[in-house]
Image: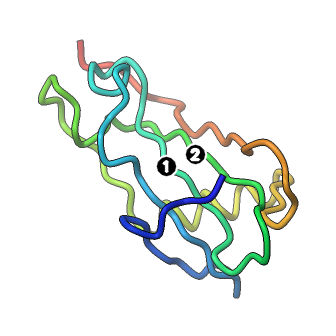
Amino acid sequence: MALNRKGSRLITVDGTTYRWRVRHRPTYAQGLCWTPLTYAVEAADGEGPGTTLVVTTDQTHPGNWLLAEPGSVRPEHVAAGIREARARGWEPARPGSPFLLDRSAGFRSPH
């Protein structure tokens, strides 16, 4: 699964360039603040389809429908997530199922 270039951002971590993106519209569960914000990361300079990293944060989606205080994903958060996933075995060039990284400890629904 490749990320769309439109709406994605590039980040270089430890000499490798990645493309990352937050889903523009929340899922139903994210809109109701039942589940936290997620973002996807993939190697930007890959020759073929690789494994996508999906990071679950401890924040609410900015487009939630309950007007809860939105979270934000900053480049330093993405870099830290990439480093943690690489340490846990994520290989962005190897094809396969998405690699899930759960960083949602501490997430609390506002209702």
Image quarter (top left, top right, bottom left or bottom right) of the C terminus: top left
The three-letter amino acid code for the residue at tag 1 is Tyr
Instruction: Name the image quarter holding residue 29.
Output: top left
- Which residue is painted at 45% across and 58% down in the image? 21
Mark 2 surroundings: few (<14), some (14-19) or many (≥20) residues within 10 A:
many
Under circle 1, the secondary element is: strand
Front residue of this view, candidates 42 and 67 = 42
For residue 56, side relative to residue 13 (left or right):
left
Asked if disc 2 and disc 1 are in contact, CB closer than 8 Å, the reply is yes
Q: Which residue of the protein is positioned furthest toward the left in this rendering?
A: 67
Q: Which residue is mark 2?
A: 55
Under circle 2, the secondary element is: strand
Residue 83: numbered disc: none
What colour scheme governs how the chains and residues are painted in the rendered image of this protein?
Answer: rainbow
- 3D distance between C-alphas at marks 2 and 1: 5 Å
Q: Position of residue 16 (x, y in %)?
A: 70, 82
Instruction: Name the image quarter holding residue 79.
Output: bottom right
- Which residue is painted at 69% across and 81% down in the image? 45
The three-letter amino acid code for the residue at tag 2 is Val
- Of the residues under marks 2 and 1, which one precedes in the sequence? 1
Q: Position of residue 97 (x, y in %)?
A: 79, 42
Q: Up-down: is 62 above or below 12?
A: above
Q: Up-down: is 67 above or below 2?
A: above
- Which residue is painted at 68% across and 70% down in the image? 43
Q: Which residue of the protein is positioned furthest toward the top in this rendering?
A: 111
Q: Which residue is mark 1?
A: 39
Q: Up-down: is 40 above or below 14?
A: above
Q: Position of residue 72 (x, y in %)?
A: 31, 52
